[in-house]
């Protein structure tokens, strides 16, 4: 397992971090090194291009990108790198993140972004882990343990109904 960050977690603004920290938390729990950065499609477009162009060479294997409103960050990253990009629609004050969701999910043919639910950063982290699990056995083992613990927890909280 390399020590370098394997997953880049990017937000269009620091105000996105409370949501994106849920992705960081599950990645960290699964022992996956990651980096959390602000990269804005509109306020820092050159930084976006530089990040996307250098990510694969720096050893990043999956990018998680969260943005709200006119949420162009995930799509523009996907346009500039072959790495898989997972988009996290950030909830917004007036449209509750429906604007973010539609901005991220409606990608044109040829440039996909894997989009999770509004605010669904934990699933973005898990999806990144599942992508990496095919290559890194320690991640696969931790992910399977996470799944098994989750199943046990749900079962333990419920009364038994099977004979
Ligand atoms: C988007 O605008 C960001 O991703 C954020 O969700 C939204 C609002 O940004 P701030 O005004 O809080 O910096 O680009």
Image: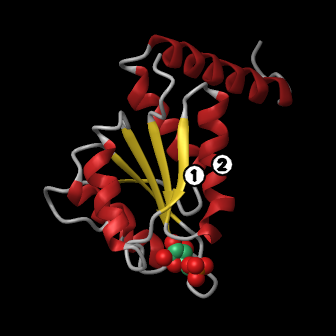
The answer to whether the residues at label 2 and label 1 have Cβ atoms under 8 Å apart is yes
Q: Relative to residue 66, is residue 123 depicted above or below?
A: above
Which one is nearer the viewer's eye here, 56 or 121? 56
> Where's residue 29, x and y in %?
67, 30
For the question of whether residue 113 can be seen, the reply is no
Asked if residue 42 shows in the view, the reply is yes
Q: Residue at x 64, y 83 (%)?
A: 93
Residue marked by disc 1? 121
| Quarter of image, ligand 1 | bottom right
Answer left or right for 121 relative to 63.
Answer: right
Q: Secondary structure at mark 2?
A: helix
In this view, the residue farthest toward the bottom is 94
Vertical position of residue 135 compared to residue 58: above or below = above
Q: Which residue is mark 2?
A: 22
Percent across and percent down for residue 99 are 46, 79
User: How much space separates mark 2 and mark 1, taking CA atoms?
Assistant: 6 Å
């Amino acid at each position: 397992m390399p020590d370098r960050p394997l997953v880049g977690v990017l937000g269009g603004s620091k105000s996105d971090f409370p949501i994106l920290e849920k992705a960081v938390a599950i990645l960290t729990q699964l022992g996956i090194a990651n980096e959390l950065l602000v990269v804005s499609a509109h306020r820092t477009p050159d930084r976006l291009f530089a990040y996307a162009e250098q990510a694969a060479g720096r050893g990043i294997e999956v990018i998680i990108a969260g943005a709200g409103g006119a949420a162009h960050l995930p799509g523009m990253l996907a346009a500039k790198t072959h790495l898989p990009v997972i988009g996290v629609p950030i909830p917004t004050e007036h449209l509750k993140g429906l604007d973010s969701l539609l901005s991220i999910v409606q990608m044109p043919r040829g440039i996909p972004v894997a989009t999770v639910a509004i605010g669904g950063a934990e699933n973005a982290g898990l999806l990144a882990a599942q992508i990496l699990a095919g290559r890194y056995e320690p991640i696969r083992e931790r992910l399977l343990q996470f799944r098994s613990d989750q199943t046990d927890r749900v079962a333990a909280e419920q009364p038994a109904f099977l004979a």
